[in-house]
Amino acid sequence: MTDVEIELTSEITVRLIQHMGSDQMIAAAAKVSTSPEEARALETVESSEGLYGLIRYLAKLRHTSPFEHSAITFYVEAPIFVFREWHRHRIASYSEMSGRYTELLPKFWVPRASRNLIPVPGYKAARPIFGPAPSALRAEVQESLGDSYAHAWETYQSLLAQNIAKEVARACLPVAVFSKMWVTANLHSWLHFLSLRVHDPNAQFVSYPQAEIEQAAVQVEAVLTSLFPLALRAFNETGRSF
Amino acid sequence: MTDVEIELTSEITVRLIQHMGSDQMIAAAAKVSTSPEEARALETVESSEGLYGLIRYLAKLRHTSPFEHSAITFYVEAPIFVFREWHRHRIASYSEMSGRYTELLPKFWVPRASRNLIPVPGYKAARPIFGPAPSALRAEVQESLGDSYAHAWETYQSLLAQNIAKEVARACLPVAVFSKMWVTANLHSWLHFLSLRVHDPNAQFVSYPQAEIEQAAVQVEAVLTSLFPLALRAFNETGRSF
Amino acid sequence: MTDVEIELTSEITVRLIQHMGSDQMIAAAAKVSTSPEEARALETVESSEGLYGLIRYLAKLRHTSPFEHSAITFYVEAPIFVFREWHRHRIASYSEMSGRYTELLPKFWVPRASRNLIPVPGYKAARPIFGPAPSALRAEVQESLGDSYAHAWETYQSLLAQNIAKEVARACLPVAVFSKMWVTANLHSWLHFLSLRVHDPNAQFVSYPQAEIEQAAVQVEAVLTSLFPLALRAFNETGRSF
Amino acid sequence: MTDVEIELTSEITVRLIQHMGSDQMIAAAAKVSTSPEEARALETVESSEGLYGLIRYLAKLRHTSPFEHSAITFYVEAPIFVFREWHRHRIASYSEMSGRYTELLPKFWVPRASRNLIPVPGYKAARPIFGPAPSALRAEVQESLGDSYAHAWETYQSLLAQNIAKEVARACLPVAVFSKMWVTANLHSWLHFLSLRVHDPNAQFVSYPQAEIEQAAVQVEAVLTSLFPLALRAFNETGRSF
């Protein structure tokens, strides 16, 4: 329909910016409650097995405050419809690219090949579940979306070319357009995020997140697992409920 | 370009759903701190003038907790780009129409006639200010946006007709599409919202909100003024900073 | 030891001040997400059985935002050691009697007759459990505490009589002295409070609150049950985890 | 009155445990909104003067989210009446020594020599201000408080000796008894804390904190000034209002 150059992608980027804390710090924070003297001697925190026992105990009894002294900042690139869900998590801090202050980028989301697209039996209004689409239909979806994005981008560019306010011109851009943000939260809050945004049939509360925010959440979980291996193990072994 | 029927509007709807509290309750909550016995006798709360003096004193000294025992719920209809800014206010509760669970409506925002569109001197990246556009240009903006929305809506409908997941089909819809929500916050939080989302050159901190969220905020302020006249007067007379 | 008149009591007072919302409003808020048109017609909300089904579904799937549009304010009189635990619940608003601004009252907590006092097998550092004390010991505890309080009160009064700042004089008062507050939270937050502050061996996460905050929480629960009978039923039937 | 060994002190301890972020990170977070490409190149952040200009601009316009990606944890030792005020700051995480789980320590607060004790003209119920006490009176206050604490401690010890639950025995301990905690908050939240807990006659909103929480807040401010010198300079130069 148009020769505007836009980028179509299914990739969602999650990259660690910075973090504070560790499994040891979770344990040390917990000891402030029960053995304040010990808490000060972080270096004496016991063997990895004793450490895990303590962290698991905290998770099991929902003594969640020790998990709140660790903080993690991620850089995220994702379509706006993912950020819309993400920003509903209120115990977090967000700095996002502004469509008022800067020109958005011609980068748009399309479903990845493995993405289920068709409602299947068991689907309910507030718990949509899907199965695969035939590959011809998949291709058609990609093409329809791509055409629609290109048309919107052309309108955006033509409005900007006429010196129209960015904040008005962007009104035509789809929720599939990519945005960028920094998001910081403490570990308690991140674990709550994972409990809602990663589907796990064995979780105490089984959640049904949209595939694209789950695609981001899985990356968050991988980073957290490398930074806080015992906390994430305890999270998993106590039902992923935080 | 197309004969799809879509609605274009500049109206943003804010309607009171429910509220709890009053100017008297703010005063009564404050008296819990200083004269607990009095606080229990709400009916004895003094003359309107004495009441205003107390509320103004609270606002001036930033004794904000008494304002938190009042709560107000609004029903809002606005384009998604307005909700995107709104949801960054974290001390509030949101229930929003879901593009995953239900089909969105063919209703899209266009700038109202009085909307300034063109950057003017004084404009800065993080403080955009605008002047009026010639009426021919205004008409052209409306038409470009309308065409773009219609094209996107057509794509959305055709994907839904092929039984594609709503949550995927909606990816092409623009941030100008209308959504609906309930939003509840306490009065402290609403006053903070007004301090950032209504431009007042006399405020202690002058803010530069986008015109459309201000259009909603002005309606919020009108309702709050009728429900809590003394609190809103104190808010204004102490610099609109909460 | 002294003839100062002080009041010793085991009563903890919880009284409803105001509330906003109902089971119907929870359902109406939920319908904003899935059937926005219906949500506006609150009066059409279906039979009590259909209503309960919806609320239970929300609780089970942790769709908690509809519970946040209801708010409840309580007046509470309790010893400071209870308020210390209470104020750790951060999703709530507090206005408390101030020991800086006003003179505290000669009212102090003593354990009620049914209060278990002696550690029993199964006791752990972070999960203390107790059994009954012999009645002679119980009487002795009451007397020791009463003497200690009377001594502290006498010091407080003598410092005030010398015109010493209230905020300094109160330093000697025990954490058993009574205070008063208003506390407001939304229903989601109150249910979370109950999940941690009422012990229920059948809960998904069994908590071990101190008896005195539980004594208050049980009263909160009774009021909420009368105001939101279906929400509280759903809370109980889905494991009391919010 | 008694030969129990207790410690009386006027010292309040604030010690940095850990932190995340820097002035550079504040600037980088801000650039996510306006120049996302630049934000990724942290190392290119400009000269200290340009950096300060940006941070001051953020503070002045109340673009506070960039300050939220930095987090700081402190270890604090202070009397309970200080913690009572501190815990009312809800955008923070606390892990405190528990009087339920562990035995409290015989360490109690007394006013330091420079502490004003006597109400002076200008004093109002919700804005108490004080002048110095004669040294004889000061000595008497210290002695009265010390006697009272010793009596309470004796009662506490005798109840523990009879195997009474720690959570019951501690009821007699005064709010002057020391406790310990870890507290973590982001920089935005810490600056808000300072705006309320440090008295500055030149601040936009002049606050009247109790001297002892100010004694802690001043130490917090000194640490933050060394970690985030430009942010604290901007905080001061824009009226200490966050």
Image (cartoon, coloured by chain):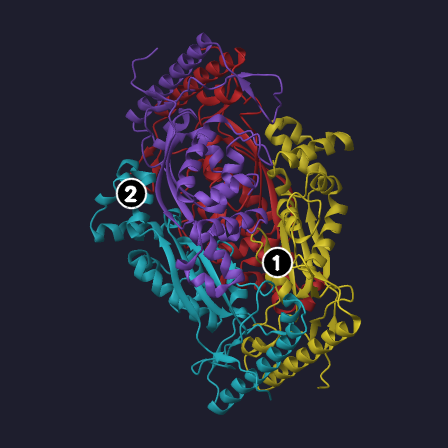
Chain colours: A yellow, B cyan, C purple, D red
Mark 2 is surrounded, within 10 Å at the Cα level, by few (under 14), some (14 to 19) or many (20 or more) other residues, namely few
Q: Secondary structure at mark 2?
A: loop
Find the residue positioned furthest to the left: B47
Given the image, on which type of amino acid does mark 2 rest? Gly
Name above or below for residue C132 compared with residue B139.
above
Chain letter of mark 1 equals: A
Picture residue at 40% right of the left edge, 43% below the top: C227
Name above or below for residue C123 compared with residue A63.
above
Tell me where residue B89 appears, x and y as whole percent: 50, 58
Identify the residue under disc 2: D122
Name above or below for residue D172 compared with residue C80.
above
What separation in Å lies between label 1 and label 2 (alpha carbons)?
A: 66 Å
Tell me where residue B173 appears, x and y as whole percent: 60, 74
Tell me where residue A83 appears, x and y as whole percent: 62, 62
Q: Nearer the viewer, residue B109 or D62?
A: B109
Q: Nearer the viewer, residue D99 or A212?
A: A212
Q: Secondary structure at mark 1?
A: loop
Q: Is residue B191 visible?
A: no
Identify the residue under disc 1: A124
Query: Of the numbered discs in the image, which one, if any, rests on residue D146?
Result: none
| Figure quadrant of residue C143 | top left
Judge left or right: residue C11 versus residue B48.
right
Tell me where residue A176 appears, x and y as whole percent: 65, 70
Q: Nearer the viewer, residue C214 or D57?
A: C214
Chain letter of mark 2 equals: D
